[in-house]
Amino acid sequence: MTQGNRIVVILGSIREGRINDRIAAWTVGQLKAHGFAPEIVDPADPELLPVQTGDKQAVQRLKQRMGDADGFVIVTPEYNHAAPGPLKTLIDAVNAEWRARPVGLVSYGGISGGLRATESLRIVLAELHSVTLRDTVSFASPWRRFDEAGRITDPEAAEAAEAAMAVFAHRLRWWADALADARAARAYDPEDS
Ligand SMILES: Cc1cc2nc3c(=O)[nH]c(=O)nc-3n(C[C@H](O)[C@H](O)[C@H](O)COP(=O)(O)O)c2cc1C
C-alpha cells in the first residue's frame, strides 16, 4: 500500500492581522503528530499573491507547490456565510492538481465555527473532482483560544480539538492512502489511460 504523506495546507485568509496563521500553525503541528508531512501554501505569500489577478508565473508556482500532493487541508475563516474570495480564486486557479485527492476542511468564525464556509467549499471541490472529508475540525470564536504560536491555551479546549483532529487525521490517512493506490493503479481521466 502507498503511504500518502505529502499534505499541502492552504490558508484561507489574506487579511492583514489575520488569525489564520495561528490556526494553520496548530493544524500543521497536529498533522505532523499524526505522521503527515505538511507544507503550507499561503495565498498572501508575495510569490503567490498575483494568482489573484491571474498572473501566469504565479499560477505556475502554485501548480508546482500543489503538484504531487497526496491531499490538502484548507484552513479557512467564514466571511459572510462563505469562504473568503481570495481562497476561492486560488482554488479556481488550478485544476488537475485537485483531481482524485482528498481535502480536509478546518474552519473558524463566530458561533458557527465557520461551518457554512466549509459547506460552501464542498460544492466547489466536488466540481474539481476532489473528495472532501466528512469529518471536520472547527473553532467558534477562536480569538482568545489561540496564542501567537498557535497553541490552544485552555487544556480542555485543546483536548477537545485534538480529539476532533484525531478522527480527521484518520480519515485523511484513509483517503490519502486509498487514492494514492488508486491513482497508481489506473489513470483517473479516461483520456490519460
Ligand atoms: C467581511 C467579514 C465578514 C464576516 N462574516 C462572518 C460570518 O458570516 N460568519 C462568521 O462566523 N464570522 C464572520 N466574520 C468573522 C471572521 O470569521 C473573523 O473575523 C475571522 O477572524 C477572520 O479570519 P482572519 O482573521 O484569519 O482573516 C466576518 C469577518 C469579515 C471581515
Image (cartoon, rainbow, N blue to C red):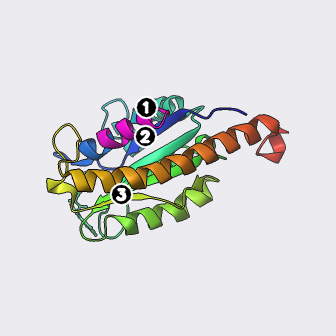
Packing grade of label 1 (10 A; few <14, some 14-19, many >=20) is some
Q: Earlier in the sequence, mark 1 or mark 2?
A: 2
Residue at the spot of label 2: 9
Residue behind label 3 places its C-beta within 8 angstroms of ligand 1: no
At 47% across and 29% down in the image, what residue appears?
61
Specify the quadrant of the image occupied by residue 118: bottom left
Q: Earlier in the sequence, mark 2 or mark 3?
A: 2
Q: Earlier in the sequence, mark 3 or mark 1?
A: 1
Q: Whole-percent x and y of residue 71?
A: 56, 41
Element marked by disc 3: strand
Comparing 152 with 109, the one in front is 152
* Residue 23 inside the magenta-drawn segment: no
Residue at the spot of label 3: 107
Element marked by disc 1: strand
At 54% across and 65% down in the image, what residue appears?
123
At 76% across and 34% down in the image, what residue appears?
184
At 58% across and 48% down in the image, what residue appears?
102
Residue at the spot of label 1: 39
- Looking at numbered disc 2 in the image, what kind of residue is underneath it? Val
Packing grade of label 3 (10 A; few <14, some 14-19, many >=20) is many
Comparing 6 with 34, the one in front is 34
Q: Quadrant of the N terminus?
A: top right
Element marked by disc 2: strand
- Looking at numbered disc 1 in the image, what kind of residue is underneath it? Glu
